[in-house]
Image (cartoon, rainbow, N blue to C red):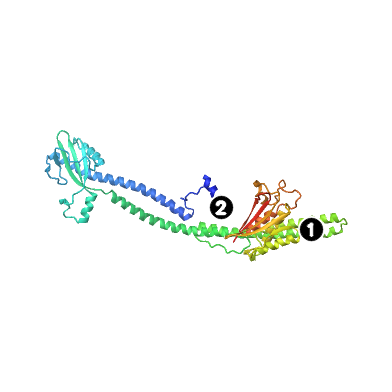
Amino acid sequence: MGRRLYARCRSDPALKFRPRLWPRSLSGQMALVIAAALFVAQAINFTLLLQERQRARIDGATGPVVGRIADAIERNTFGDPSRSDRGRVRSVAVSPVAPGGEHRPDIERSLRTALSEAGIKIGRVETEVRTLAPDDQRLRYTGKERRERFRRAGGELMIAVERPGRDWLVLSVPWFRGEDMIFWHLVSQTIVLYIVVLVPVLVAARQISKPLRALAGAARGFRPGEPAEPIEGRGPQDVRDVIAAFNALRLRVTAMLDEKDRMLGAIGHDLRTPLAALRVRIESVEDETDRARMADTIAEMNRTLDDILSLARLGRPSEPPTEVDLAALVEAVVDDFLDLGEEVAFEERARLRMRLRPSLMRRALRNLIENALKYAREVEVQLAEAPHQVTIAVCDRGPGIPEARLNDVFEAFTRLEHSRNKDTGGIGLGLALARAIVREAGGDIMLANRAGGGLTATITLPR
């Protein structure tokens, strides 16, 4: 069965296993939502800060350059072309900017705009970021580590401005690549923000989800009639209100079931009294055939009444679970049928200790065997043991049941008249009662048609 289910899951696209990205717990969902919101907010913040930083760096680099060029042109004072003094405007014939160097088009556009607004006629504007040489005299007073950091950060920005038909004005200014530094600064800021925000959120969500998990466990473990302590109200007031409502609901449900049991007991007593009186009165009937039929009718009414009361009271069994030998229990039920002259086969097995309600389990097995004997002369009962479960199979060679209606027979008051003998007795409660008993014990009953004809009813119980 496991292989068939696995193959079906592999072949059905709707049942294929996919990784779970959305957490199921409340704390996980809250943490994921807040983490995603923080990520979006920080991404927007990153973008705005980087843009603002870039604009500030460009303005800081172009503003003084425009002032120095304008002042040098106005006073006609240019530095020595053979030297590369930082900040001095030099006049050269050819642009010293290397074509394959690291250019800054954004600074070039900003300089062209600023110089045009200052009334200076220019041609091309070229820039190049240069790394300072290890023996650069401007680094002679800095430490080794700081000097290397300056060299990796860029060092200086070479700017060349063409005056059409005349010369190139060249100067260099300090320039450092600060994008990496601000990026890692923002990353560390985000990590701190995540820790500061997510940790309290996870703690608060856990305080909310813990009482909710306790409430869910109490709801799953609720058994009418069994003593249970009320759940302690913890967490926020909303959660406390839910827990208090569940405690009150459990009391109301228990009270309603108690009232139902009292009503069913009264109904059973009121019905059995006239049936007992009828059983006494039919003794005066002279015709033995009529008297036997009347007695059978009264016995059938008593069995039906027992089934109805048992099915209605099954949720609150009075019999406590005990340690029993399941093999001996099955053998005792089979012996009862053998004493009645029925052909029921069972192979004796070793002791099999299990904890269950023996009277109810005996009744469930008896119902299955009776149901099989109605449609077949011979019935075989098999008991098998597996590592984590025990199975009891009741096999017959009757007409079987259509595949489409194998589950319908477990509904109360359901009889498949078209698939089985119409003359059989009962009102359709035997299988319903058997499944209810087995499920109350934590197991289940499955029906399957046998190869060659017949039906197999399998009880599966956990160990």
Is 367 situated above or below 118? below
* Number of numbered labels in the structure image: 2
Q: In the image, 432: left or right of 205?
A: right
Residue drawn at (15%, 41%) of the image: 71
Question: At which x and y percent is residue 64?
Answer: 20, 44
Residue drawn at (37%, 54%) of the image: 193
Instruction: Mark 2 and mark 1 in contact? Answer it, CB < 8 Å.
Output: no
Frontmost residue, 360 versus 390: 390
Residue lying farthest bottom?
A: 323
Q: In the image, 388: left or right of 123?
A: right
Nearest to N terminus: mark 2 or mark 1: 2
Separation (CA) of disc 2 from disc 1? 51 Å
The residue type indicated by label 2 comes to: Gly
**Would you name the residue on which mark 2 appears?**
2
Q: Quadrant of the C terminus?
A: bottom right
Q: In the image, 71: left or right of 179?
A: left
Frontmost residue, 296 versus 92: 296
Query: Looking at the rendered structure, which numbered label has been put on residue 275?
Result: 1
Question: At which x and y percent is residue 44?
Answer: 36, 47
Let me know if residue 166 appears in the view: yes
Question: At which x and y percent is residue 131?
Answer: 21, 48
Residue lying farthest top?
A: 165
Numbered disc 1: secondary structure: helix
Frontmost residue, 286 versus 210: 286
Residue drawn at (60%, 58%) of the image: 249
Q: Residues within 10 Å of mark 2 (few under 14, many from 20)?
A: few
Residue depth check, mark 2 versus mark 1: number of the one nearer the observer:
2
The residue type indicated by label 1 comes to: Leu
